[in-house]
Image (cartoon, rainbow, N blue to C red):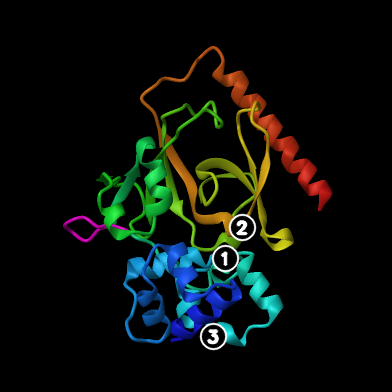
Amino acid sequence: MFLSNNLKVLRKRKGLTQDEAAEAMKISRTKVNAYENEHSEPTIESLVMLAAFYNLNVDTIIKTDLSKLSDKQFEELENGFDSYISGSKLRVLASTVDNDDNENIELVPAKAKAGYADGYNDPDFIAQLPTFQLPFLSKDRKYRTFQLDGDSMYPIKDKSYVIGEFVQNWIDIKDGQAYVILTSDDGIVFKIAFNHIKKDKTLLLHSLNPLFQDYEIKINQVKEIWKFVSYFSSELPDVNNTREELLGAIKGLEDKIKDLKMAL
């Protein structure tokens, strides 16, 4: 394990003293010194906080000797292209189970979106979310449900609930499929994704609603990805408009895929 030395390497690479690092992370200098000199071990919550501060993943900080990396390799890490993106190592995912040890489907309501952006990897936060089970979903996969806030994916309406399957390997993201993506800048977004990770370490995000423009995000801004499985809503679709709008959205998506293929 390389945790203590890695923390020193990362702090110095940022050009910070122990006092400055402690102030930025809102912890005591004593803790920073203790972690870096193996006088004490950080809790899981503290590990997650340290990883977020240095923009790396927990597994990388613990198991990779960062002092042996070249500048180019370090730049790759800092750009978010570490072992977690390729799925070669297990992501740390806070989860809950029912009384029979079955994985719950946690529900993230719209009012909890801001809290989820900070607490997505905090077992205590996740444990406070409502949970339920759906017998038709696979027991071998992890699911979570997110309530939409906005109409960028119309005709899927505002306040609908989207069920997502946890994506372990981000390289497997399929062009033109829908995903719930937790980002460091925009929080939870629900979009059609186009995978540019191998090309330039980005995802192109597209909305079904033509009023919203496409945009790119750097992969190092991404915290979690959930593949769209299903959704449910308390509102009936607008019968008069939904078919035409849906066909228009599909046509726009087909054109987008065609343009992207021609650009490759």
| Residues at discs 1 and 2 in contact (Cβ within 8 Å) | yes
SS class, disc 3: loop
Nearer to me, 22 or 70: 22
Report the residue marked by disc 1.
85
Q: In this view, does 111 lie above or below 29?
A: above
Residue 117 among those drawn in magenta: no
Residue occupying image coordinates x 54% and y 63%: 169
Which residue is identified by label 3? 65
The amino acid pointed to by label 2 is: Ile
Residue 82 vs 132, above or below: the answer is below
Q: In which quarter of the image is residue 215?
A: top right
Residue at the spot of label 2: 219
Residue 249 position (above or below residue 89): above
Per the rendered image, the range of residues in magenta is: 95-102
Label 1 SS: helix
| Mark found first going from the N terminus, 3 or 2 | 3
Extreme left residue here? 99
Magenta region, mostly helix, strand or loop?
loop
Residue 177 percent location from the top left of the image: 59, 45
Q: Could you classify mark 2 by the number of other residues whose Cα lies within 10 Å: few (under 14), some (14-19), or many (20 or more)?
A: many
Quadrant assignment, res 161? top left
First along the sequence among labels 3 and 1: 3
Label placed on residue 54: none
Q: Which amino acid does label 3 sit on?
A: Asp
- Please count the marks in the image: 3
Q: Residue at x 54, y 65 (%)?
A: 55
- Left or right side of 88 for 36: left
Residue placed at 37% from the left, 46% from the top?
A: 115
Discs 3, 1 touching: Cβ within 8 Å: no
Q: Which of marks 3 and 1 is in front?
A: 3
